[in-house]
C-alpha cells in the first residue's frame, strides 16, 4: 500500500497506522529515508505519525535509520509542533550511538527543547541528551555540566530521574 493511501485510510485508527508503518520499517518493506521524504511535505499530524513509527522501529532496530535520516530528524527538533519535537528526540535517543559524530549538532536543539513548556517534549529531550552524554564525544564534559544545570532547574521528578541516571552512567 502506498504511504498517502495508508495514512488517509479511515478504517485504521492512528495508533494502528503507526504500528503498521513501524512493522514495515522493521521488516525492511519500507525504507526510513522514503518515509522521511514523504513526511517532509506532509502536514504536522501525518509527519508526527511517520516520526513516531520511526521511533517505534528504531527501538527494535536502530540501524534502519541512515545518516541522512538522522540529519533530517535533527532538523525536525526545531518544528513548532510538540509531538514532532518529542518523537524526533526519541528517535535521536534510540540511534545516537550509531552517529556519535553527528550528535553534537543535535545538542543545541535538544537543549532548547529541554526548556519547552510541554512535559513530554522536556522528557524526550532529557532522554536524548542522556544518551548523548554517555557517548565518547569531544564535548562530553561540557555537556555533563549543562545537564547538571538543567537537573537543578527542572521541576518534574520524572525528568530529573532521567538526567540523574544518565549523569551517573556518564561518570558523575
Image (tube, rainbow, N blue to C red):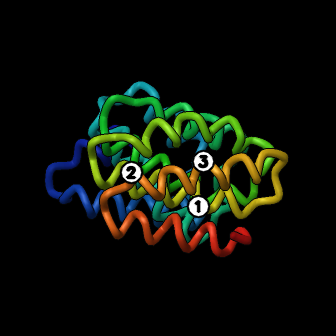
Q: Could you tell whether 58 is left or right of 47 in the image? A: right
Query: Residue 85 falls in which quadrant of the image?
Result: top left
Q: CA distance from mark 1 to mark 3?
A: 11 Å
The image shows residue 146 at horizontal and vertical percentages of 60, 47
Residue occupying image coordinates x 31% and y 58%: 155
User: Label 2 neighbourhood size at 10 Å, few (<14), some (14-19), many (20+)?
Assistant: many
The image shows residue 169 at horizontal and vertical percentages of 67, 74
Q: Could you tell whether 41 is left or right of 73 in the image? A: left
Dot 1 or dot 2: first in sequence order is: 2
Which part of the image, by quadrant, shows the C terminus? bottom right
Q: CA distance from mark 1 to mark 2?
A: 12 Å
Q: Could you tell whether 1 is left or right of 34 in the image? A: left
Q: Which of labels 3 and 2 is toward the front?
A: 3
Which element carries disc 2, helix, strand or loop? Answer: helix
Number of labels in the image equals 3
Q: Which mark is residue 130?
A: 1
79 to 36, vertically: above or below = above
113 to 94, vertically: above or below = above
87 to 15, vertically: above or below = above
Residue occupying image coordinates x 20% and y 58%: 12
Q: CA distance from mark 3 to mark 2?
A: 15 Å
| Residue to which mark 3 is pinned | 146
The residue closer to the viewer here, 159 or 21, is 159
Which element carries disc 3, helix, strand or loop? Answer: helix
Residue occupying image coordinates x 48% and y 51%: 150
| Residue to which mark 2 is pinned | 122
Which element carries disc 1, helix, strand or loop? Answer: helix
Amino acid at each position: 500500500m502506498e504511504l498517502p493511501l495508508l495514512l488517509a485510510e479511515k478504517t485504521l485508527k492512528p495508533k494502528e497506522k503507526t504500528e503498521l508503518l513501524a512493522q514495515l520499517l522493521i521488516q525492511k518493506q519500507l525504507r526510513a529515508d522514503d518515509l522521511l521524504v514523504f513526511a517532509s511535505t506532509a502536514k504536522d499530524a501525518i509527519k508526527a505519525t511517520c516520526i513516531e513509527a520511526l521511533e517505534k522501529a528504531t527501538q527494535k532496530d536502530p540501524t534502519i535509520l541512515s545518516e541522512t535520516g538522522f540529519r533530517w530528524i535533527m532538523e525536525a527538533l526545531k518544528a513548532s509542533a510538540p509531538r514532532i519535537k518529542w518523537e524526533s528526540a526519541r528517535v535521536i535517543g534510540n540511534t545516537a550511538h550509531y552517529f556519535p559524530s553527528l550528535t553534537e549538532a543535535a545538542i543545541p536543539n535538544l537543549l532548547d527543547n529541554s526548556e519547552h513548556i510541554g512535559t513530554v517534549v522536556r522528557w524526550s529531550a532529557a532522554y536524548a541528551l542522556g544518551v548523548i552524554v554517555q557517548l565518547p564525544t569531544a564535548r562530553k564534559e561540557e555537556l555533563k555540566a549543562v545537564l547538571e544545570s538543567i537537573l537543578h532547574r527542572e521541576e518534574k521528578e520524572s525528568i530529573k530521574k532521567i538526567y540523574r541516571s544518565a549523569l551517573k552512567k556518564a561518570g558523575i
